[in-house]
Image: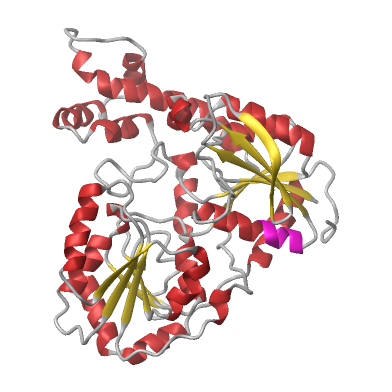
Amino acid sequence: MKIALLTHKIKPPLIGGVDVYTDRLGRALRRLGHEVVYLAFDSSGEGSQPVVQADAHHDGARVWRILFAFDALPKESFDTAYNPAMGQVTRQILAEEQPDFVIILNFYMLTLATVEAAKSLGIPVAHVATDFVPVCRWGTFMRWDNRTCEVGESIQTCASCFISHRPLGKVMSAVLEKLPEPTVVNWAEKEYRLPHPLGVARPYLTHAATMKQRLDRIRPLRQQIDLVLVPTRFTETTFLNNGFAAEQVHFLPFGVDTDNPLASISKTKSDHVRFMFLGRFQPYKGLHLVLEAFNSLPHPNNASLTIYGAPDGHDAYFANLQHMMDANPRIHFAGLIPPTELARAFADADIFLLPSTWHENSPLILLDALQSKTPVLASDIGGVSGIVEHNRNGLLFPREDVAALRQAMQRLIDQPELIQQLQAGSSLPSIESYAETIVTKMQAFLPNPKPAGVA
């Protein structure tokens, strides 16, 4: 069969998790005998109107790029997860390629207009849930205070989320969330301004109007997706609680390349326990928690901590991290690491740290760690606790609990035999089995279903 993969950039070097997984999936599909074509975006173009470029290739497969200027995109594209211009060029590409079905791995720039484009041509659609864009205007399922959203997407709760960082916003939210939704929507559709009594509520009402527009737009598009593949039970619950039907959603953990160098590394010898952090230097990734815990270990016994990453737009946060790193000679800041060096990094690590303060989806770096037989010390959060099993392939600690994190680190230092025990606890599905499952399930949605095993 011919399968179109709609993704992020798919441009070497592949660094982002979406592109890395798209590459793995595309290669697996081709090994299974299917033809693959990629559709990706390139935000380095000029103008808000997307332009199609079709002269690129990836691993021998054709890549269609949608070029546009990021800063020129209409704000509504992000608010509503819908950009009709993206849908138009996607439809143009799919009409020429005529794939049997499409797999959409990322909606961030391409938006849910791609679903509309495919379905208008009668092409079945699968979505691999790599983020929360279809169920959260932020795309992160986090609220304004960096806490995980516990209430889900709605007109009033989301309007509150966008204004509660200000004291007056909190007051307005507390009042307006208690009103019936039709009342709030009615007010939101009017242009109340000061000195009108409702003028003070204008920021809330503006976001309520935006959320109504978003939900009116994407609710029917979500229902047009034939198959939604979720990698963790947390993601499954999140999608089911926020507009997706049970018959759409299928739990399927991400697969790994069995021939990946990570699967055959040999750990280097060390006379001390080596912790490793690799990720973005953003508050929700929790590096500050690691540094606080590591710097206050009661008996470090020469344990070391190697940190890979780079500043990511949070200058004040990074400055604080630097101060904490500089305070301890056993901490090594190694900067960015190219994907080709991952095997070396994991060979020199005994424990991988994942201290996120928000619910993850299914971070690929976590799978990389487990494939390399590196036990994981991670926050007990959705998207992680379904992969890391406490005392089997890693240890879990309560989110943002520095004392518990420090205690777990000390336990690993004091019990090196535990590290060896945890190394033997990982078992991951292959990317081939993952690809086969998608193809088998999508057979049911083809206009003229083909017998199983026929490419």
Which residue is depicted at the point 59% across and 28% down? 50
Question: Is 314 rendered above or below residue 293?
Answer: above
User: Main SS type for the magenta part?
Assistant: helix
Whether residue 29 is in magenta: the answer is: yes
Q: Which residue is drawn at 59% across and 37% down?
A: 223
Q: Which residue is drawn at 57% across and 54% down?
A: 12
Residue 60: horizontal and vertical position, in percent?
Answer: 74, 54
Identity of the residue drawn at 70% across and 38% down: 54
Tally of numbered tags: 0
- The foreground one among 379 and 70 is 70
Give the quarter of the figure containing the C terminus.
bottom right
Residue 347, placed above or below residue 231: below
Q: In this view, does 191 lie to the left or right of 94?
A: left
Which range is magenta? 26-31
Quarter holding residue 345? bottom left
Q: Is residue 243 visible?
A: yes
Quarter holding residue 359: bottom left
Which one is in front, 105 or 280?
Answer: 280
Q: Say left or right for 32 vs 245.
A: right
Give how far across and how far down residue 8 sits, in percent: 55, 45
Is 242 in the magenta? no
Q: In this view, does 296 lie above or below 222?
A: below
Rendering quarter of residue 156: top left
Spot the residue most to the top.
Answer: 195
Q: Position of residue 46 (x, y in %)?
A: 53, 28
Give x and y (percent) for residue 220.
57, 31
Q: Is residue 198 visible?
A: no
- Residue 68 relative to residue 273: left or right: right
Color encoding of the figure: secondary structure
